[in-house]
Amino acid sequence: MSVQLKGRDFLTLKDFTAEEIEYFLKLSADLKDKKKKGIPMDVLRGKNIVLIFEKTSTRTRCSFEVAAFDLGMGVTYLDPSVSQIGKKESIADTARVLSRMYDGIEYRGYGQSIVEELAKCSDVPVWNGLTNEYHPTQMLADLLTIQEQLGRLKGVKLTYMGDARYNMGNSLMIACAKMGMHFTACAPKRYFPDEALIKQCEEYAKESGATLRFTEDVEEGTKDVDVIYTDVWVSMGEPDNVWVERIKDLTPYRVTMDVMKNAGENAIFLHCLPSYHDHKTTIGKQIGEKYGLSELEVTDEVFESSYSRVFDEAENRMHTIKAMMAATLGAFENE
Ligand code: CP
Ligand code: NVA
């Protein structure tokens, strides 16, 4: 294998070639298979990792923890209320302290520049567990799920509906452009990704055979595509007062049964989760009641339908994070 992943940071898929991404996916599938068969893979016994979460999480935190335990590693979890990061100690000093104790550092928080600074000042791999701009570990899970469900990546048509300027829209555009997929952002114009990132992705697309499309038209943007993807309309860290305009702007882009039918009978629905598809959450209930909506970015009918593969996708977070850690920590470097 010509890919060299040992010691690498995992900050955005922009930093990886299609061949390297394929390697992560192959290793993920292999580790998933071994887990299902009950074959122990504690190949990183004796190593320790630290997880820094400045925003909340269910999937990402649990995936890092379970994956680390399966690989035989120890884990420390730091949330913002118990660590000194940013308040009493700079990112640079934190990175230098933690890399004396740990073999890998995960960071979930705000600006991408923070995780980049952490990586620059750290001697061990730093893994991005979500920033405002990117969510690269989610991408490995999404690509693995698409490959499992549709049998291929190249040529797959994926439409992202919603706020395409944020971590999920940006990351899906990069992932599709790298892997030769056909990406559509279907949203009002001002929710399209940043021009500079589009240009960069157009360069990747020239090499991979991918295409990028941006449309405000739901019927055109979802017609005959293979994957419909959406995310919450208001992301972690955004102020509550953006809900009014998001609901107004993005309600026409909700994933409904009409959207899924327009996409085609073999289409699948994906969502990084958590999702507001009913009133069974505090925020879903509050917002729903305030604005008279029973569901937000996706209808409950679609979420619970046979189109939906969201729980396969969530499970794959763990297998892909395991592969990403194993590869960057050099678990299989002599194979
Ligand atoms: N998809 C995702 O990152 O979920 P969490 O916020 O629960 O980690
Ligand atoms: N865009 C969402 C993704 C959650 C996994 C957020 O940043 O909150």
Image (cartoon, rainbow, N blue to C red):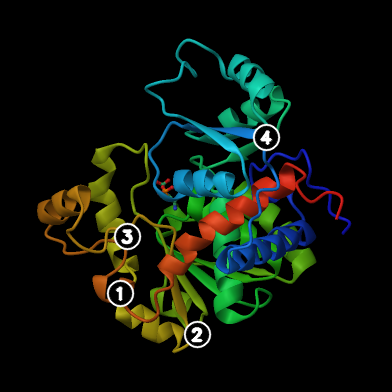
**Mark whose residue sits in front, 3 or 1:** 1
Is there any visible trace of residue 260 in the rendered image? yes
The answer as to whether callout 1 falls within 8 Å of ligand 1 is no
Q: Where residue 150 sits: x, y (%)? A: 58, 80
Image x and y of residue 238, in percent: 35, 38
Task: Say which amino acid is labelled 4.
Answer: Gly
User: How far across and how far down the image is residue 70, in percent?
Assistant: 58, 50
Cα gap from disc 4 to disc 1, whole angstroms: 42 Å
Mark 3 vs mark 4: in front: 4
Q: Which residue is mark 1?
A: 304
Which quadrant: the N terminus? bottom right
Alpha carbons under labels 2 and 3: distance apart: 21 Å
Read off the residue under disc 2.
224
Q: Nearer the viewer, residue 222 or 192?
A: 222
Spatial CA distance of label 1 from label 2 is 21 Å
Q: Classify mark 1: residues with Cα within 10 Å, few (<14), some (14-19) or many (20+).
A: few
Residue 114 lies in quadrant: top right
What residue is at 73 percent from the left and 44 percent from the top? 328
Mark 1 vs mark 2: which is more N-terminal? 2
102 lies above or below 199: above
Report how far apart the C-alphas of labels 2 and 4 lie in the structure.
Answer: 50 Å
